[in-house]
Amino acid sequence: MRSPSEVGAEAVPLVRPLPADTFCPQSRRRFVLIAAILASALGFIDGSILAIATPAIRVDLGASFAETQWISNAYALTLSALILVGGAAGDRFGLRHAFVAGIALFIAASLACAVAPDPPMLIAFRAIQGIGAAIMVPGSLAIIAKAYPKKERGRAIGIWAAASALTTALGPVLGGVVLSAFGDGIWRVIFAVNLPLGLVSIYLLLAKVPADAPTEKRSLDLGGAALATLAFGALAYGLTSMSAEGEGQMSGPSIAAGAVLLIVFIVFERRQREPMIDLSLFRVGAFAGANVATFFLYFALSANLFYLPMLLIAGWGLSAAEVGFIFLPLSVLIALLSGPVGQWSDRI
């Protein structure tokens, strides 16, 4: 006959089981949140400061206007073309593994950007940086959602969003002050600062956070990703070369090639068993309308972030610090309104 203590030991488990909707013990979840905030800061700080630093990079490297555009375009191109594949990688290999790989590639490319000797090398490293971001950006929010149970998830995502908004708001001001104080050559520090943030994030993920199991063995649709990259790259090159001296004759053929590749991409995706994007979603009016509106929104916003700093610095003679403070109201309003607007959209 067993003693009461033995019966009690069986009745009360020594280790509290995890909720079904999380892979991470409660004591480790804060490390997931800190790592995700630091990783998000890499992209947000990098992007917001780079908008102010673009004129300095152009002067320091002697870049043409077209090359200056590609320093920004190369990153956006690979990020946008591969972000869906990056999200699928988290499902296939586990979010922690994919997230760490994305951060590692991003900071390695950032260091290469920091020592780039000329515009072509910087453009190439920026493209690699975009590949890392395509894995890192979707992984940041996804690992928070998977680590926290449903009742705690909203608060964790709110903290992440607030921290991301703060880094976005402060980026242009800090970048402008640093550039004004130390000169154009200091732009390289913008990329080098990603190293400590990224290493701390990787350490927390590997040392403090348990590995999560892959959710599904879905294919990565690398063929679709390659076609999307080539199509968008050809279109971007054609549009950029319109204003480039001596390259205008390539504009028409490049745009035509991009349009053909885009059609090939659509046909390819429709025949895939597991496509990168389900094209039937665009038959839903709300989905298609939201994507069209988002396209024009970011088209206008990106143009302002790229051209306005160069106009204000090169045309109006303002300092980088002054330009940073000019951008501050925009950044602060975006930071303050992101949360409430999301809640309003849920109600609508």
Image (cartoon, rainbow, N blue to C red):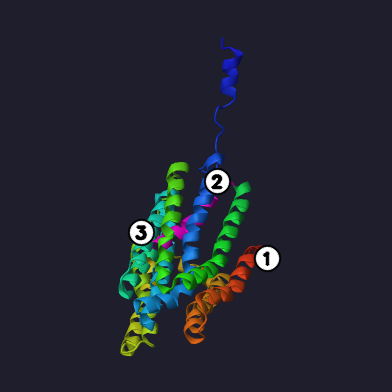
- Which residue appears at 36% of the width and 85% of the height? 241
The reply to whether the C-beta atoms of the residues labelled 3 and 1 are less than 8 Å apart is: no
- Which residue appears at 37% of the width and 76% of the height? 60
The reply to whether residue 73 is in sight is: no
Q: Residues within 10 Å of mark 3 (few under 14, many from 20)?
A: many
> What residue is shown with label 2?
30
Kindly identify the amino acid type of the residue bearing the numbered disc 3. Ala
Earlier sequence position, callout 2 versus callout 1: 2
Which percent across, then down, holds residue 172?
A: 53, 70
- Which residue appears at 56% of the width and 22% of the height? 10
- Examine the image and state in which quarter residue 169 appears: bottom right
Q: Distance between the residues labelled 2 and 1?
A: 28 Å
Range of residues picked out in magenta: 131-149
Residue 136 forms part of the magenta stretch:
yes
> What residue is shown with label 3?
108
Earlier sequence position, callout 3 versus callout 1: 3
* Res 344 label: 1
Residue sitting nearer the eye, 222 or 242:
242
Element on which disc 1 rests: helix
